[in-house]
Amino acid sequence: MGAIITLTDAQGGDRVDTALAAGVTPRSYGGRMRPPPSLPVPVGLVTCRALTAYDREARDVLTGLKNRGERAWVTTLGAQLAELAPEVDGLVVTWAPTGAGRRRHRGFDQAELLARAVARRLGAPTMGLLRRRPGPAQAGRSLADRRANPRFEARDRCARPVLIIDDVATTGATLTAASEALRAAGVPEVHGLVVARAPRPGTDYGP
C-alpha cells in the first residue's frame, strides 16, 4: 500500500482523500505523471483515491487505452490501482459503466477491464452491479451538465461494501450518481478508485 493521506479541506471542512501508489513515480508511464490533487471526496463515497492528476500525460495514456486499443495498460494500471484499494472486509469490486454506444464502438468498457484487473490483484469478487441509463456522454459537457447528467440503476441488491472503479473523476458526479444507486440497493459503504482525478478548474500544470 502506498502512502495514504487524509486531509481536511480548508474551505469547507470536507474530507479530502489523496493517495500515491508505491512505485508511481513521475516517469512511471514514460512521462511526467503528477500526484493526484487533494480534493474533497465526492458525495456518497467513504473514500476516493486516484493514481495521478488528470493532465496531458494521463489523458494520453487513457486515450490510448480507450481509443487506440492499447489494452496492455490494463495490467499496469490495474496493479497500481490495487495498491490503493481500501482495506475493507468483504469488499466487492464493480465499475461505473460507460454508455452502450461507446461500449459497442470500442468493443469493451475500459472501466470494467480495470475493475477486473484490480479484483484479480485483490482476490476480491467482481460484480456488474450498475446499469447506466441512456444519456449523453460526459466528455465535453459543462460543469453543471456533468453534475446533472449521469444516471445509474442497480442491477441487483448487495449488502457488502463496494469499490467503484472508473478511469477519470472530473467533477465526481459519475461516482456520486453510482454511489446513490448502490446505496439504494442496500450497499452499506461505497469507495471510489480512479486512474486520474481532474484538478480544480484554473489549475495550470504547464506544458
Image: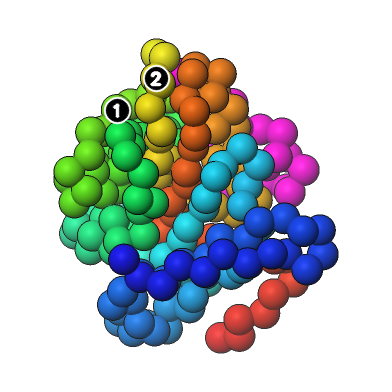
Image quarter where the C terminus lies is: bottom right
Q: Answer yes or no: do the residues labelled 2 and 1 have beta carbons within 8 Å?
A: yes
Image: magenta residue range: 135-155
Sequence-earlier tag: 2 or 1: 1
Mark 1 neighbour class, 10 Å CA radius: few under 14, some 14 to 19, many 20 or more: some
Q: Amino acid at mark 2?
A: Cys
Q: Residue at x 41, y 59 (%)?
A: 195
**Which of the pair 152/42 is nearer the observer?**
42
Residue 126 location, quadrant: top left
| For residue 160, above or below residue 50 | above
Q: Which residue is mark 2?
A: 158
Q: Residue 21's x, y, as percent?
A: 35, 70
Residue 151 location, quadrant: top right
Mark 2 neighbour class, 10 Å CA radius: few under 14, some 14 to 19, many 20 or more: some
| For residue 163, above or below residue 75 | above
| For residue 185, above or below residue 61 | above
How many marks are shown on the rendered structure?
Answer: 2
Q: Residue at x 49, y 28 (%)?
A: 188
Q: Name the secondary structure under disc 1.
A: loop
Q: Residue 190's x, y, as percent?
A: 49, 37
Asked whether residue 137 is drawn in magenta, I would say yes
**Which of the pair 83/97 is nearer the observer?**
83
Q: Residue at x 58, y 69 (%)?
A: 37
Q: Name the secondary structure under disc 2.
A: loop
- Report if residue 52 is visible in the image: yes
| For residue 107, above or below residue 132 | below
Q: Which residue is mark 1?
A: 127
